[in-house]
Image (cartoon, helix red, strand yellow):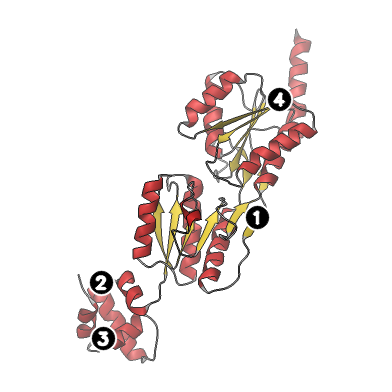
Amino acid sequence: MANVKDVAKLAGVGLGTVSRVINNKGSVSDKTRAKVLKAVEDLNYIPNEVARNFKMKETKLIGLMLPSVWHPFFSKLAYFIENELDKNGYKMLLCNSDSDKNKEIQYIEMLKKNQVAGIITISYHDYYAHGKVDLPLVTIDRYITDDIPHIASDNYQGGRLATEALIKGGATKIGYLGGKPPHRSSVSDRMKALIEVASSYGLPYVIEETDGSNDQVAVEKFIKAHPDVDGVFTSTDLYAAALIKALRQKHKKVPEDVQVIGFDGIQDNDNFTPYLSTIVQPVEAISRQSVQLLLGIVRGEEVPKETILGVTFRQGNTSNSNKEIQAIVTRKSSNKEKY
């Protein structure tokens, strides 16, 4: 593998000149710059970011800790975070923790050794709360301490919008199905909003929080325990998809028999059926603002400790609009008249 000395030799310049070109610092003539860049290309030279960080005492690396890169929502976050970091001259080190505390701690130690400038994290553990990280931190959807800035969607607003949509769609008994956060998280506000809105309408409701280990088992248990629920708000779109699958296996129609509204907005293409009714999180805005928050901390600036971004309700095929309700009522009336 080529090194910086090979580049300097091929270009016929000194190591300092190569360094100035690679780091885009200092004065170098256009002709010399072109020679160095051609040598870099010919040798397929890749600068060692870590070595440069140690030498320059300055880092352009940011760590991103996610519970699962497999999850579409987290994948979207990673995409936009990397894009925003790149725009600001930073590179991203992606860590997939699998929600495993020991694995997460190992990743944190790795990030420290790589001298990252800071970490953006979605964590289900309280490791960060004990001052063991000692790096600039920003959390997404997770409250850790008052000193660590966090950014999130307006989860309460999302829960309110979803519950009101179910009620307007004709639901008479509402259910909430979702994972239970192990630590304080604004995600819990989704359930809180459902309880308060349903109560304000005088409607019965049921709450089922799971450990998140098996979505399909959780939804089947929910359906069996609450056969009279006709409107369900799930904490994620993946729970909603699993619920719809299980309802169909029980020969229940969505939304005629049971309305389902998810949370996240990961389904981008309405050609897939059913097109899920859901609360859409502003993923791109969350990603880009989390980067700006972290870079602000890195620069020594004061940044807000809490940033809450609005969400929207997207009407799909799994909940009733007022027009759809009227159509269903009309069809049922027509059927009765025939007999």
Sooner in the amino-acid sequence: mark 3 or mark 4:
3
Q: Are marks 3 and 4 in contact (CB under 8 Å)?
A: no
CA distance separating discs 3 and 2: 17 Å
The three-letter amino acid code for the residue at tag 3 is Leu
Q: Mark on residue 15?
A: 3
Task: Give x and y (percent) for residue 240.
Answer: 56, 34
Task: Give x and y (percent) for residue 128.
Answer: 48, 55
From the image, state whether disc 4 or disc 2 is nearer to you. Answer: 4
Sooner in the amino-acid sequence: mark 3 or mark 1:
3
State the quadrant of the N terminus: bottom left
Residue 171: image quadrant is top right
Q: Is residue 64 left or right of residue 15?
A: right
Q: Residue at x 35, y 85 (%)?
A: 20
CA distance separating discs 3 and 4: 73 Å
Q: Which one is nearer the viewer's eye here, 80 or 122?
A: 122
Q: Is residue 173 above or below residue 308?
A: above
Sooner in the amino-acid sequence: mark 3 or mark 2:
3
CA distance separating discs 2 and 1: 43 Å
Residue 323 visible in the picture: no
Residue at image mark 2: 44
